[in-house]
Image (spheres, rainbow, N blue to C red):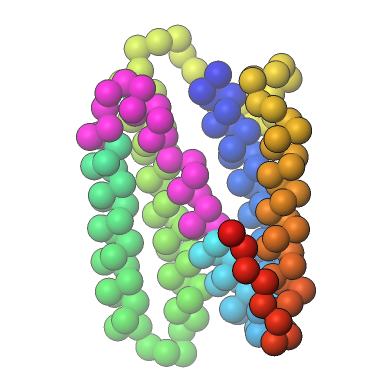
Amino acid sequence: MAMTAFGMRVTVSAAISVLLFLFAPFYAHSIENGIATALLAIWAGLQGLYATSWFDYLGKTKQQNIIVLMERTCSLLLMLCMLELPHYLHKAIVAGLILLLIRLVSVAVQIKWWTTIFHGPRLSIRLGFPKKHLGINMQVAAASVSNALLVYGNQLFLRGSKLELASY
């Protein structure tokens, strides 16, 4: 069940990533800003693919924390190096792409490490949505997604005006 849920998270992340790359340039001042925004948004969203609960289940959160510490250290060193690059380079795109690659490697290492520690049956990741009901209340999930679209969609519509809409 853990791999099925993970496969579903990967599928949703991939779909959202495609949508971000398609629509982010329309909301940015330039295509370069749109691509950089999409890369950084995907980078931030991929934190949801961390295998934190899996390591917690095995009582091995220290190993997962070591991986995340290494990821964050690499990210910090990258940002320090980015300060030295010339301005004519597309710094935001380069930084977003490298940060995204670091995060992808971190998630892959977490999964690989967890599968070597886990002494249960061999698991394989299946992309897509589960065929059987996993205890997810689809009505609550649909309401949550539609609420998020409504609240954050309104922010996009009000972006150019002097009006503001708070979300609680």
* Quadrant in which the N terminus is drawn: top right
Q: In this view, does 26 lie above or below 115?
A: below
**Where is residue 25 drawn, in percent x and y?**
69, 74
Q: Nearer the viewer, residue 12 or 147?
A: 147
- Locate residue 20, reporting x and y percent: 67, 61
Q: Is 21 colored magenta in this rendering?
A: no
- For the magenta stretch, what is the residue range? 42-63
The answer to whether 118 appears left or right of 10 in the picture is: left
The residue shown at (59%, 78%) is: 33
Is there any visible trace of residue 22 in the rendered image? no
User: Image point 62% across, 63% down: which residue?
Assistant: 167
The quadrant in which the C terminus is found is bottom right
Q: Nearer the viewer, residue 55 or 73?
A: 55
Residue 93 is situated, as x and y percent measured from the top left of the image, at 51, 73
- Total count of labels: 0
| Outermost top residue | 121
